[in-house]
Image (cartoon, rainbow, N blue to C red):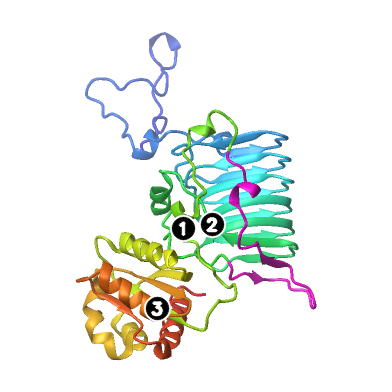
Amino acid sequence: MGCCFSKRRKPAQGGQRQEACQEPAAGEEKAPQYSWDQRAKVDPKDYTFSGLKNETVGRLPGKVAGQQFVIQDCENCSIYIFDHSATITIDDCVNCQIFLGPIKGSVFFRDCKDCKCIVACQQFRSRDCRKLEVFLCCATQPIIESSTGMKFGCFQYYYPELALQFKDAGLSIFNNTWSNIHDFTPVSGENNWGLLPENAVVQDYVPLPASEELKAVRISTDAMKSIIPITRGQRQKSSDESCLVVFFAGDYTTANARKLIDEMTGKGFQLVQTKEVSMKAEDAQRVFQQCASEFIPLLERGPVVALEFNGDGAVEGCRNTVNDVFNGTKVFVSESKASASQDVDNFYNFADMQMGM
């Protein structure tokens, strides 16, 4: 339909055939133009780094804009993708430092070794890799397969465009299962993965870019500025007392959660884990129990944001801070040390089922 060569024309006078795609004569209909005809053509070379050695390369914010990206056969390179993408595959890379901005789908490392990375993604996969050290934000359970010497830490990074890139990639800054690794091919008596030291310094692993072009990105690796809240994940808790705090959807939900994190960590409490998830009335009954009726009407506004804090006196600390800082805002806070442990288990068991963990 609409092909300009779909109808044979008779030869013009003089025996010469008219051009098949010439401009239509007066009175003839113009061939329709479709939106996909107007799209800029994508050149795969613009979204590929291949066969590089001893180079610093990257893409600035806005230059990938949700496309797929491929990195392959690179050695001793520093690679920075300061934008959101659809998926990224990294194949056969050796001794590289890699930063990957938010990835809407999966990142897949294959046959890589001795690489240090900072990655934010929906899904993390590795196969046949050796000695990767990864500061990770991953919305689902990271999976390693036939990989050894893998080390993981919590994503810690900031530049001004990063928050919007997370939104464009459909990722929540509060959904990060960086330490909940599933080893698809475990070996009896061995551990193919572990956690990076708590005091690991991001720049010691992935230095800031040295090229003039990439220096234009205003980067901070300060934990206090990190887009992703720094959580303990599956590290051993320092206390047997935790507290669950749940913020309900509104104009300032993210800002309020960040404010409480700053307040509580500033007082010496530890942030164990965070989660952003939608709840229904029956979920609230299971999680909030006697208090459920107070919070059910708030669930229609959108997802809730939950935080688990740990430390001696965490419940009292959370309740006092919420009363002082968020007076007038509906917030669920564990009532006592005795009930808090059950609150945490109830919420995160529900959240894990909801997210298919």
Q: CA distance from mark 2 to mark 1?
A: 7 Å
Judged from the image, the secondary structure of the residue bearing numbered disc 2 is loop
Q: Position of residue 336 (x, y in %)?
A: 37, 87
**111 and 319: which is toward the camera:** 319
Q: Position of residue 27 (x, y in %)?
A: 22, 24
Specify few, some or many for label 3: CA neighbours under 10 Å numbering under 14, 14-19, or 20 or more. many
Mark 3–mark 1 CB contact (< 8 Å): no
Q: Is residue 247 visible?
A: no
Judged from the image, the secondary structure of the residue bearing numbered disc 1 is loop
Judged from the image, the secondary structure of the residue bearing numbered disc 3 is strand
The quarter of the displayed image where residue 330 is located: bottom left
Disc marking residue 23: none
Residue at 26%, 29% (x, y): give it. 29
Q: Is residue 153 visible?
A: yes
Placement of the N terminus among the 4 image quadrants: top left
User: Which residue is situated farthest in the left direction here?
Assistant: 328
Mark 2–mark 1 CB contact (< 8 Å): yes
Give, as a single range, the part of the protein colored magenta.
179-208
Q: Tell whether position 203 is magenta.
A: yes
State whether residue 285 is above or below residue 173. below
Report which residue position mark 1 lands on. 228
Specify few, some or many for label 1: CA neighbours under 10 Å numbering under 14, 14-19, or 20 or more. many
Report which residue position mark 3 lands on. 244
Pick whichever of labels 2 and 3 is earlier in the sequence. 2
**331 and 30: which is toward the camera:** 331
Q: Position of residue 64 (x, y in %)?
A: 48, 40
- The type of residue carrying mark 1 is Ile
Pick whichever of labels 3 and 1 is earlier in the sequence. 1
Report which residue position mark 2 lands on. 155
- The type of residue carrying mark 2 is Phe
